[in-house]
Image (cartoon, coloured by chain):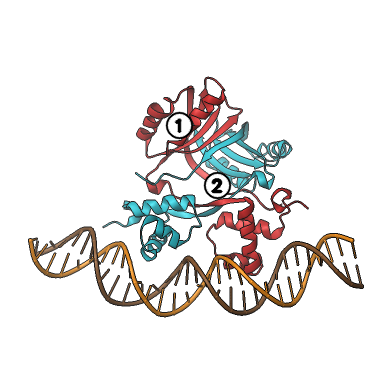
Chain colours: A red, B cyan, C brown, D orange
Amino acid sequence: MPSKVESLDLDRYDRQILELLQQHGRISNQELADRIGLSPSPCLRRVKALEESGLIQGYRALVDAKRMGLNLMALLHISMDRHTPERFENFEREIERLPQVLECLIITGQDADYQLRVLVEDMDAYHDLLLHKITRIEGVTGVHSSFVLRKVMERGVPCMG
Amino acid sequence: MPSKVESLDLDRYDRQILELLQQHGRISNQELADRIGLSPSPCLRRVKALEESGLIQGYRALVDAKRMGLNLMALLHISMDRHTPERFENFEREIERLPQVLECLIITGQDADYQLRVLVEDMDAYHDLLLHKITRIEGVTGVHSSFVLRKVMERGVPCMG
DNA sequence: TATATTTAGATATTTAATGCCAAAAATACT
DNA sequence: AGTATTTTTGGCATTAAATATCTAAATATA
């Protein structure tokens, strides 16, 4: 019988745990146990197992970017001249060094290779990042920017049904 | 004298707390205190203050989507026929009801009004979502899809300097 | 049906979180 | 510069939670 990790036989309890921990990542085990209708011992065992298996990859505090003075979120679509491993590896290494880059995805369907999510104080900071950092990376031939006017909603991965 | 909330006089300790909690959202207060070089009492007080002020909006467990069998992440750029509040409100209400939609942003710079981030099992599920759910929402005139080939990196908002 | 295996729940123990108070540090004031 | 005021730290006692261990129940297997 294969382990829970690959076969993924998650029951109602596991799914509820995942849903709740995605909404309230720092809920106490006792509260969690209460909410899913299980006693603390087996509840904790399940949480540990989910962490152990890698299904729960970690926990993150959600920080209000606006209150940190980071008022401008932008999505940058980046085109590369050549699609060689070296190009990609170098780009990704350089991106890693920029704390303003919150996310980097390789995408298809746009006329772009990467989508970057960046977070900066204002237009000046954006301008500086774009001109002096992003476009200076070797192989970058084009950048198209979208600005995020509003975050309508955001949530975790669906774990029920 | 303005409160910490708006004036944002975060010192080294607060910033370290924010950085660490974004990486390890469930770290114990004692460990956290150790790492930032403060005793548990003032450390906990600071964390509570950051939560209270709303700078820390909450905590989230990070769930491995692939292991949940959700193998396909797509970015959908949605165009609307009219840019009226009613259109937007209705669209956002409908999107809210779709658990596959992880994020919804209003953007500028693309020829689209929204960027949706969706997570589904496979192409069939994507196709179904697109045809039977997204395009059926009133006012949606166009959808352009990008598929995420790889998530290169992801991290929280920068809190240092 | 009997047996093996897994999972839940109870309890005791360890560890962490919380609240309170005195001391130290930083700040403001004269 | 010296003193007073405010703020923040650190220690300690208390409360609560996490963890480990064991027994009982439920489930699956032969």
The residue at 49%/28% (across/down) is A90
Judge from the rendering whether residue B125 lies leftward or rightward of residue B106; answer left or right.
Answer: right
Q: Nearer the viewer, residue B153 or B38?
A: B38
Looking at the image, is mark 1 or mark 2 nearer the viewer? 1
- Please name the amino acid that badge 1 sits on: Glu
Residue A71 location (% of width, % of height): 40, 42
Callout 1: 10 Å neighbours few (<14), some, many (20+)?
some
Q: Position of residue C16 (x, y in %)?
A: 48, 65
Element type where label 1 sits in the image: helix
Depth check: A136 or A63 in front? A136
For the residues bearing labels 1 and 2, Cβ distance under 8 angstroms: no
Asked if labels 1 and 2 share a chain, the reply is: yes
Label 2 Cα neighbours within 10 Å, binned few <14 / some 14-19 / many ≥20: few
Tell me where residue B113 sits by quadrant: top right
- Asked if residue B100 shows in the view, the reply is yes
Image coordinates of residue A151 in percent, x first then y, are 50, 43
* Residue at mark 2: A154
Query: Distance of mark 1 from mark 2, alpha carbons?
Result: 28 Å
Check the image and report above or below for A6 versus A37: above
Asked if residue B114 is positioned above or below residue A31 in the image, the reply reads above
Horizontal arrangement in the rendering, residue B149 relative to residue B34 (left or right):
right
Q: Is residue A77 visible?
A: no
Left or right placement of residue A140 versus residue A21 in this view: left
Q: Residue at x 38, y 30 (%)?
A: A127
Chain ID, mark 1: A
Q: Residue at x 44, y 52 (%)?
A: B20
Residue with the mark numbered 1: A94
Among the 4 quarters of the image, the one containing residue A111: top right
Of all chains, the one bearing label 2 is A
